[in-house]
Amino acid sequence: MEKLSSVLLVDDDTTNNFLNELLFQQLGVTDQLTTMENAAQALEWLEQTAESQEPALLLLDVNMPGMSGIEFLEAYQRLPHAQGAKTVILLLTTTLDARDLSRLDELGIAGLVSKPLTKEKISDILQLHFQRTLPA
Amino acid sequence: MSPSLPANVFPALLELLPSGVVYYLPVTDATGTVVDFTFAYLNPAAQQLLRLPAHPTVTYTQHFTQADSEGLAFHRAAYQQAAPAHRTGYYQAEGYDAAFTMQAQRVNDALLVHFTLDAADRPAPHAQEQATRQAMQTQRDELARLFEQAPAAIAVYRGPNYTIELANSTVARLWGRTQEQLIGKGLFEALPEVAGMGYEALLDGVMATGTPYVAHAMEAQHDRNGQRETVYWDFVYVPVHAADGNINGAMVVATEVTQQVRARQQVEHLNQELENRVRERTRQLSEQQQLLSRILGQVPAAIATMSGPEHRYTFFNHLYQDQVNHRAVLGKTVAEALPEVVDLGFTALLDRVYATGELYEGREVPFHLHAVTADGHATHYINFVYQPLKDGQGQTTGVLVFALDVTEQVLAQQLVEHSQRQVQSLNEELAAINEELRATNEELHTSNAQLLRTNTDLDTFVYTASHDLKAPIANIEGLVHALQRNLPAPVLQEALVARLLALMQGAVSRFQQTIGHLTNIAQLHRLEAPEAVDLATLVADVQLDMASLVEATGARLTVQTETCELIHVAPKTLRSVLYNLLSNALKYRAPDRAPQVHVRVHCLSDQVIVQVQDNGLGLSEDQQARLFGLFRRLHTHVEGSGVGLYTVKRLVENVGGTISVQSQLDVGSIFTVSLPL
């Protein structure tokens, strides 16, 4: 399988990040996994990143102290180079809340993924958004 | 004949005899019937008496021209029979007016007749006598004329059959007959219509006693003017004497008084009618008086009348007497009978009404009697009217008192007022209590609002807690998995490590399950909108969900949905309720018998009732009380979370419904849910 160019994981939960990093490594999804525990920091990082260096997949937690996932998205949409960006953004949620679902379009995100991430969920994401299949 | 008497004695004897002897020879007609006699021999006496010569040339009928037919008939009869015949009579002819006696007997083919004439009436035909006779005749004619023309009805009857000898024109007119129809006939033969009316007895009486009979307005009937008329007579019967002094007849002198009688009868009739009318009117008046008196006696009011300025009683009824303790006396004044009324001012009022002629009306006037009356009230209250009584000229002559005892009503009224006061005070008390209740209610409202806020806070807490706990438990689960993957195989195979990992995995699972339940419960406060639901389909869906469990337990499930088709309810609520109750019925089955579950759904006008009946373990009363609590598990032998019935209760109560249970330990339970429509 062709690995993804890069993946950005934004979540304030360190344990969760550790487990997800472990999962991505095990599955060999990408060689470039960046983890951020602060949404504002992640936004700043993205602003400074060249268009060619943008991540293929952004996994974003919703409930975070300081800037929440939703606030991040609103700010991200205002970024000049976000308009033509090819980054696939998925929201990580603990519950599939209808209020969040209704904002999918206006927030410009590709979908929702319920926590915790598993091998099956990642397989589905690759299949759905990147037409790639994990090796057996 | 004596042989000693010589034959020549006979002619000498005939010559000597003072009485007449005639020897007749019969004269017969062609048929042999004797029609006359010829004088064959007359002795000297006969010649003298009959004024005939010794050998007359005339026959019997020629000589006795004025003789009645009876004379010839007598002679003929005497000739035709053998035995001697006798006859007496009057002979009024040839200047004779004399009584005669006659014996006749047939001798050979001749008739021998011997006769005498009354010597006194022997004719004395000299001039003076003739004149006297003439005068008498005149007198007699005048009498006859007078009799004939008399305005009174006069008749003479003679003999035992009352042969009418005389009847003047007046009587003939009144009897409605002609004189010819009357004279010579018997009275009752001529007037058969009067026979049997009592006249016979009257006439017989007069004839027998010689005493005249006077009658007034005696009724008789006469056929006259072409009809039978009832007429009335005033009359007198006078006996008529014969020459020998014996009574042999009667004379009647009568005047018809029919009109007077009729007039009198009419007057009497009118009198009778008048009397009857007076009697009837008197009776009516008396009845009216009795009625009036009865009415006045029965009127439930005291009535009295008083006359004159002193107000003397002229009338009072029973009730009036009752009201004044039986002291009223006719003729006494009110002040005399009831001295206390003077001070009470009643007499002054009576005076005023009498003086002014104006009515006075008193209402609920207290009236203190001297003696306490039978009903025990010392004070009576009366409504009364003093009505002036006026004569034809409008002058007041008295006063009518009309009084109603209203004591009971007044006392009742007072009682009602008392009750009303009591009711009012009760009302005030109630108002105070109401006020307190309102205050309490407000406090309850405040408490309720606080509880609602607390409840909402709790819901929010549960939601947030369940949400926030999910991430860490997921992390723990991930960490355990990671550890499991990264531990070397020999370590994993160590018994203790394997057990620790399994226990950690189990703890994480239970934690996650609890969080899941909390999440569900946190979502319960959200109201589900009702929609049209086809009940049969919904029940069938639930049955399908339960199919494997039903099969596994060998249960018999029956469903009865009556009077419900399309209903308007919250579909998920109803489905969840039904699912929970059915799965409980199967889960908590009795170990010794196959489960029988009966679902009955029926609709009322404003609610749907769902009943689930099982024959399972059943619940004690103590258990029933704790049944619907959160995380309350009454049985541990089967898997359960202690959330199901709590969830059902919340769901049902959220939409305004109710849930109840009837159960008996080891017999079964009936859960009854009602949901509003």
Image (spheres, coloured by chain):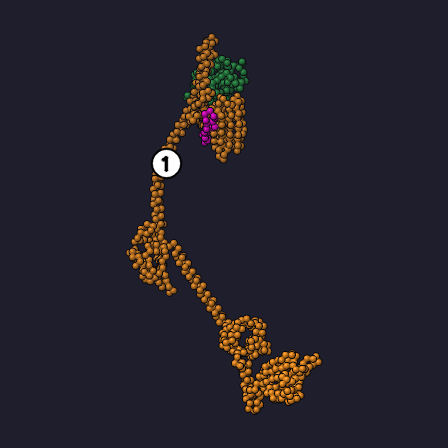
Chain colours: A green, B orange
Residue at position x 55%, y 91% in the image? B128
Taking the image as shown, residue B674 lies to the left or right of residue B59, namely left
- Taking depth in this image into account, of B601 and B409 the one nearest to the observer is B409
* Residue at figure coordinates x 31%, y 51% from the top left: B372
Residue at point 57%, 84% (across, down): B99
x and y, in percent, of residue B56 in the image: 65, 88
How far across and down, in percent of the image, does residue B127 sit? 56, 91
Residue B55 vertical position relative to residue B651 in the rendered view, above or below = below
Q: Secondary structure at mark 1?
A: helix
Residue B242 vs B560, above or below: the answer is below
| Residue B615 on the magenta segment | no
Q: Nearer the viewer, residue B238 or B474?
A: B238
Looking at the rendered structure, the kind of residue marked 1 is Arg
In the orientation shown, which residue stands out farthest toward the bottom? B127
Quadrant hosting residue B59: bottom right
Q: Position of residue A115 (x, y in %)?
A: 47, 19
Above/below status of B428 relative to B387: above
Q: Residue furthest top?
A: B490
Is-magenta flag for residue B656?
yes
Query: What is the chain identity of the residue bearing mark 1?
Result: B
Q: Quadrant of the N terminus of chain B?
A: bottom right
Residue A50, visible in the rendered structure = no
Residue lying at the far front in this picture: please name it.
B4
The span shown in magenta is: B653-671
Depth check: A115 or A103 in front? A115
Residue reaching furthest left? B343
Residue B510 seen in the current view: yes
Residue B609 relative to residue B360: left or right: right
Residue under label 1: B438
The image quadrant of residue B495 is: top left
